[in-house]
Image (tube, coloured by chain):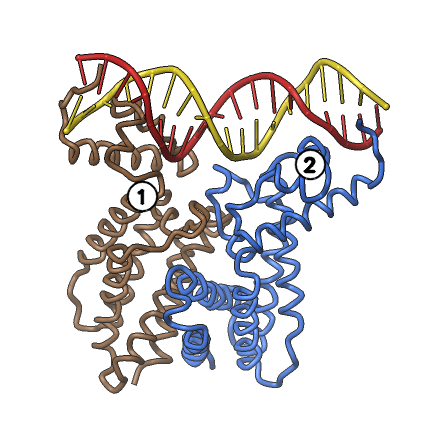
Chain colours: A brown, B blue, C red, D yellow
Amino acid sequence: MARRSEHSQEEIKKMVLNAAETIIIDEGFSGLKVRKIAIEIGYTVGSIYMVFDNMADLIMQIKGRTLDNLTEQLNQISINDDPAKMIEQLASIYLTFANQHFNLWRMLFDFSLIGDDTVPDWYQDKVDHIFGIVELQFKQLSASYTDEQTKQASRALWSGVHGICILSSSGKMDLLGIKSIEETVMLLVKNFIKGWKL
Amino acid sequence: MARRSEHSQEEIKKMVLNAAETIIIDEGFSGLKVRKIAIEIGYTVGSIYMVFDNMADLIMQIKGRTLDNLTEQLNQISINDDPAKMIEQLASIYLTFANQHFNLWRMLFDFSLIGDDTVPDWYQDKVDHIFGIVELQFKQLSASYTDEQTKQASRALWSGVHGICILSSSGKMDLLGIKSIEETVMLLVKNFIKGWKL
DNA sequence: ACCTGAACACCGTTCAAGT
DNA sequence: ACCTGAACACCGTTCAAGT
């Protein structure tokens, strides 16, 4: 065998990523294996290494797609005159995303996957862009702060919202209930903004 | 060979945990291997399975010790009349701990280690106890809230502090600088408390 | 009873060999 | 040039066999 040319390299790349995502969604990250992906797309393991450097590379690409998906969701935000309401909405969208794409979202913050994965620039840019979406709303909130202060405040609150999502997800998501988590997120957002405004 | 009885089971258990911690500190979690631990303590792999069910069990024990260590640090807090100051102090201790025991701290929130690790009760108790330390200070802050509201507020803020530590650690710890991270943590704490108090 | 170490199943990764 | 699949190194885990 060999030399089939049924799919272009680019097509195989997408097939691999799609198959990998499905596996992660269904079985969690620990269920992701090269051989399983190969079977799924009808190729052998060697072919996967034609289009990806290694597993670390493949994982990074998946994380990139997850960030793109999240960005798209955040951009679905409906316009509101009150920037505080928009920040609350962003937080709500984030929480919903974390729940709907739980296994993929979880992967974004797993760093034991590889020892010293130095984050590539294109990936960091995607992360920064998401922070930028929140920052934009913070600018509308109070014009009397410097850009640096606004940036720090938006980072503080957004990291905080993320922290609630993460800690809630590990162990007690079901016990507290997702409704209660949304309340907790809103509590953080509202009180922080109340303290920060003016 | 076999049958040495140079150490009791309990001694071997501690030797394994100590060796494992040293490896994690020096090389990160991804450097932790059964065979490496065995060599380090002068036994063979089989002996490790005499005192631990498996790697998941061993990891849980290490995480437990890390939580104990953290609790000890948080209890070093110096008494202050202003509960807000004490909460700030707790946040500062947490950030310091995350930095000083980076690899061990990071492990606490890695869930890809095993597929579905159901958290044991004794472990969840340790986590709850840490939340309890913060909650106690929140009670002093405002007596006009219900216990449920106090609990939710302390969870919201503490999760938020944790979120800043986590997101800062992934990628940009050096760029922003630890000094700046402490500032960001304090910004979150102060503004949240300002918004919540009364 | 305590401990060994060979064996097993299962990984990611490589690369000579086919078409 | 594209793809295969056997081979390699390296995991965690088990367990019959020694003392």
- Please say if A79 is above or below B141: above
What subunit carries mark 2? B
- Determine the CA span between mark 1 and mark 2: 34 Å
Q: Is residue A102 left or right of residue A133?
A: right
Q: Residue at x 16, y 36 (%)?
A: A10
Residue B96 x/y as whole percent? 54, 70
Q: Quadrant of the N terminus of chain A?
A: top left
Residue occupying image coordinates x 52% and y 66%: B99
The image quadrant of residue B36 is: top right
- Whether pointer 1 and pointer 2 mark residues with C-beta atoms closer than 8 Å, the reply is no
Q: Which percent across, then down, holds residue B142?
A: 53, 78
On the picture, is A16 further left or further right than B166? Answer: left
Q: Which residue is mark 1?
A: A57
Amino acid type, residue under disc 1 in the picture: Asp
Identify the amino acid type marked 2. Ile
**Camera-nearest residue between A170 and A108:** A108
Residue drawn at (13%, 30%), measured in percent from left and top?
A: A8
Residue B125 percent coordinates (x, y): 63, 53
Tell which subunit mark 1 falls on.
A
Q: Which residue is mark 2?
A: B48
Task: In this rendered view, identify the residue nearer to me: A53 or A194.
Answer: A53
Q: Secondary structure at mark 2?
A: helix
Above/below status of B189 relative to A94: below
